[in-house]
C-alpha cells in the first residue's frame, strides 16, 4: 500500500489542491477575504499546465457563477468560491442552476454580516445556504466541514452529489476553517473526463444530443404554467430523494446524554471541548454535529429528543440553525441557543456556562 503523504496547509489551500486532484475542469472566482487563498493557490499551482484545468478570475461574483452555469451545463466539473457578501451576489445564478438542473460546486467561507460586515469568521449564512437564497422553490445541498481534512474531502463529495442529482452543492465553511492550518491527506489524483466520457455520463449536457440529434437546451425558463408546475413537482420529488438518502452527521457521547449540544463547522470543534469540560464536572453532555445542513438530520435529532431533556444549539450567529432543531425536537425537549456575533468566536467555557444556565 502506498504511503499517504501528509501536508500542513490552510483550509482554503486544501480546497484548491483537492479541486485539481479531483479532476475539476474549471474554477471561476473573485477574491474576497477570508477565502482569497483558494484562487491564489490555484494561480500558484498553475493546473492549466498539468491537468488542463481552467482557472479564471472573473470580473465579479455575478460573472463567476454564470461561468459555472455554462461550464456545468456542458457537463464539466466546475466550481467557484467566495465569502458571504459575494455569495449573496451569486444567488440569482444559483437559483437559475437549480431550476435548469445544472451541477456545480460553490464554496462559501463565511464572514460576519449583515452587509459588508467584518472579515472575521461567522456562521450567519445558514439561512442563505439552506433556505435557497434566490427565488423559487429550490434547495442547494449544503456540506459543513469542521476541519482542513474535510475541506479537502468534501470537494470530491460535492462534485459527486452535484452530478448525481444535477443540483448545485455548497461547501459552507467559515473563516476559522478557511484560515486555520492543520495536517491533511490530499485525495489521490483523478483524471479529468474526456469529451466522450462526458457525453456518455451526461447525455443532458449541451455537448450531448437529444434522441433526434438536436442540441440540448438547458434553461430555467418556462412560460406555460402547467408545464412549469410539472417541472417544479419533479424538483420536489428529487429533493425528497435527497432528504431520504444523503443526510450526514456525527454524534459524540449522546447515548446517555441528558444535554445535547448541536453545532456545525468550526464551533462544533469548540463544542467538543465543552463536552469534555462538562463531563469532567459530572454533567451528561453529548454533541450532535450536522454535516449536511441541507438535507438537515431532523429525524436523527428527533430520535435524540426522546431521551435528552435539553438541546443547546451553539452557533456563531444570532440563532439560525436553532429553528431547524426546534422543528425537529417538536416540543419533546427544551431547546435554547448560544451564539456570538460580529465575528466573535467563543471559547469552550462560554458554552459550558450556557449549559449551566440552560
Image (cartoon, grey):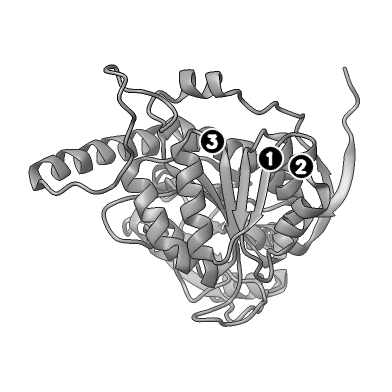
Residue at 64 percent across and 38 percent down: it is 24
Decide if residue 251 is in sight here.
yes
* Circles 2, 1 touching at the beta carbon (< 8 Å): yes
Label disc, if present, on residue 53 of the rendered structure:
1
Tag 2: Cα neighbours inside 10 Å, few (<14), some, or many (≥20)? many
Q: Nearer the viewer, residue 297 or 285?
A: 297
Residue at 55 percent across and 19 percent down: it is 197
* Left or right, residue 99 beside residue 167: left
* Left or right, residue 250 beside residue 52: left
Q: Which residue is mark 2?
A: 47
- Mark 2 or mark 1, which has the lower sequence index? 2
- Mark 3 or mark 2, which has the lower sequence index? 2
Residue at 41 percent across and 36 percent down: it is 166
Query: Callout 3: helix, strand or loop?
Result: loop
Q: Total label count?
A: 3
Q: Which of the 4 quarters of the picture holds residue 50?
A: top right
Q: Which residue is mark 3?
A: 76
Query: Callout 1: helix, strand or loop?
Result: loop
Q: Nearer the viewer, residue 281 or 341?
A: 341
Q: CA distance from mark 3 to mark 2?
A: 16 Å
Locate residue 231, reporting x and y percent.
21, 39
Q: Nearer the viewer, residue 309 or 183?
A: 183
19 w.r.t. 36: above or below: above
Locate residue 302, reporting x and y percent.
39, 47
Q: Nearer the viewer, residue 174 or 103?
A: 103
Amino acid at each position: 500500500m502506498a504511503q499517504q503523504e501528509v501536508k500542513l496547509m490552510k483550509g482554503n489551500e486544501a480546497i484548491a489542491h483537492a479541486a485539481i486532484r479531483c479532476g475539476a475542469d474549471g474554477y471561476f472566482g473573485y477574491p474576497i477575504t477570508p477565502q482569497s487563498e483558494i484562487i491564489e493557490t490555484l494561480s500558484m499551482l498553475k493546473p492549466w499546465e498539468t491537468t488542463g484545468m481552467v482557472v479564471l478570475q472573473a470580473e465579479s461574483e455575478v460573472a463567476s457563477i454564470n461561468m459555472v452555469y455554462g461550464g456545468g451545463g456542458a457537463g464539466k466539473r466546475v466550481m467557484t468560491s467566495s465569502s458571504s457578501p459575494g455569495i449573496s451576489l451569486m444567488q440569482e445564478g444559483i437559483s437559475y442552476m437549480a431550476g435548469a438542473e445544472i451541477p456545480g460546486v460553490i464554496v462559501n467561507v463565511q464572514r460576519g454580516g449583515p452587509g459588508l460586515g467584518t472579515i472575521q469568521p461567522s456562521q450567519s449564512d445558514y439561512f442563505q445556504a439552506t433556505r435557497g437564497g434566490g427565488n423559487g422553490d429550490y434547495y442547494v445541498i449544503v456540506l459543513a466541514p469542521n476541519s482542513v481534512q474535510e475541506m479537502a474531502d468534501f470537494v470530491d463529495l460535492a462534485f459527486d452529489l452535484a452530478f448525481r442529482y444535477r443540483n448545485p452543492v455548497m461547501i459552507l465553511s467559515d473563516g476559522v476553517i478557511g484560515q486555520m492550518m492543520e495536517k491533511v491527506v490530499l485525495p489521490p489524483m483523478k483524471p479529468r473526463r474526456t469529451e466522450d466520457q462526458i457525453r456518455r455520463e451526461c447525455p443532458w449536457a449541451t455537448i450531448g444530443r437529444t434522441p433526434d440529434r438536436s442540441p440540448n437546451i438547458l434553461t430555467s425558463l418556462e412560460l406555460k404554467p402547467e408545464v412549469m408546475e410539472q417541472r417544479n413537482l419533479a424538483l420536489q420529488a428529487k429533493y425528497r430523494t435527497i432528504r431520504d438518502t444523503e443526510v450526514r452527521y456525527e454524534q459524540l457521547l449522546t447515548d446517555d446524554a441528558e444535554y445535547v449540544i448541536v453545532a456545525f463547522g468550526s464551533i462544533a470543534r469548540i463544542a467538543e471541548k465543552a463536552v469534555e469540560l462538562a463531563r469532567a464536572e459530572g454533567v451528561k453532555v453529548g454533541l450532535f454535529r450536522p454535516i449536511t445542513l441541507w438535507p438537515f438530520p431532523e429525524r436523527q435529532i428527533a430520535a435524540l429528543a426522546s431521551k435528552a431533556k435539553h438541546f443547546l444549539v451553539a452557533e456563531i450567529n444570532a440563532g439560525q440553525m436553532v429553528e431547524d432543531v426546534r422543528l425537529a425536537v417538536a416540543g419533546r425537549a427544551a431547546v435554547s441557543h448560544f451564539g456570538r456575533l460580529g465575528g466573535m468566536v467563543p471559547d469552550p467555557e462560554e458554552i459550558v456556562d450556557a449549559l449551566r444556565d440552560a
